[in-house]
Amino acid sequence: CFPVTIRGRVQAGYGHFILNLPSSESFTNNRQLTSKQIVALNYMVAHDVATMFELQSQYGDKKYDGTKYQIPAWIREGFVQLFASLAVKEASKSSKDHAEFLVESELLDTFPRNLCARNLQDFESKDRNWGSSCISSQNLYAVELLVARHGGLDALFKFVSLFGASDDWTKSFKDAFGLDRANFYTEWYEYLGIPTSEHPPVKPAAPPSKY
């Protein structure tokens, strides 16, 4: 990790949208934000910065031709959530870990003890229609598991850069983390405590999608 200083303006309309404020509330007349609202804005700024880090790791010096291949949405979002959560936790005085801090701040659902309505396999393309807090939160927990057990953050960046060079996400996944996607999904379901008989069947991998 290294310190990053960001200076700039945040558009008031964007902040109003992110905080889900009613139209009757505004940022005029020196309106003071609550501590939770400040954390939410900090998280979203860190989320956007982490997205730029992910894209830079993916493409490096590769010539951009106007199209990009999408890393599977659950990995991309989990990558960004992980770095954003670490950043806002580091900036806080909380003794909780980064995931607990986000849960406390109402930015993340608690760890799922059951399968969400849609599982990780449903987000191997560019689809990011999470639909519920469980589906959105599982991205961070899954990437956190992947990083913790299979090579750390170095492996995560290696996967992103390998995919950027090859556009073959399943091979990049195995080369970076040392196991294939099917084995990781089994590990994820076991981590959730799902009985083997109830594991969703592993479907063919989704091909990379351009966006």
Image (cartoon, grey):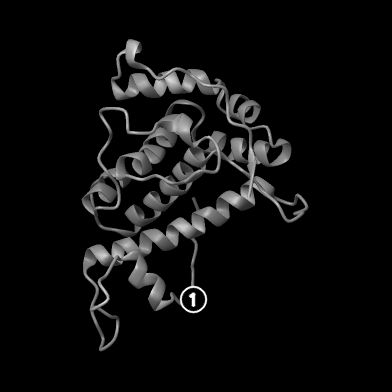
Residue 33 falls left or right of residue 81: left
The residue carrying mark 1 is: 8
User: Residue 195 vs residue 182: left or right?
Assistant: left
The residue sitting at the bottom extreme is 29
Up the image or down, 145 lies above or below 100; here it is: above
Residue 87 picture location, percent across and down? 40, 54
Check the image and report above or below for 115 versus 27: above
3 shown above or below 142: below
Image position, residue 68 (x, y; %): 67, 49
Residue at 41% over, 71% down: 14
In this view, the residue in front, 177 or 122, is 122
Where residue 204 appears, as percent x and y from the top left, is: 57, 22
Q: Would residue 9 be found to the left or right of residue 162 on screen?
A: left
Instruction: Give SS at disc 1.
Output: loop
Q: Is residue 152 above or below residue 188?
A: below
Which residue ends up furthest to the top in the rendered image? 197
Q: Position of residue 83 (x, y in %)?
A: 44, 49
Residue 158 figure quarter: top right
Give the residue type that dot 1 points to. Answer: Gly
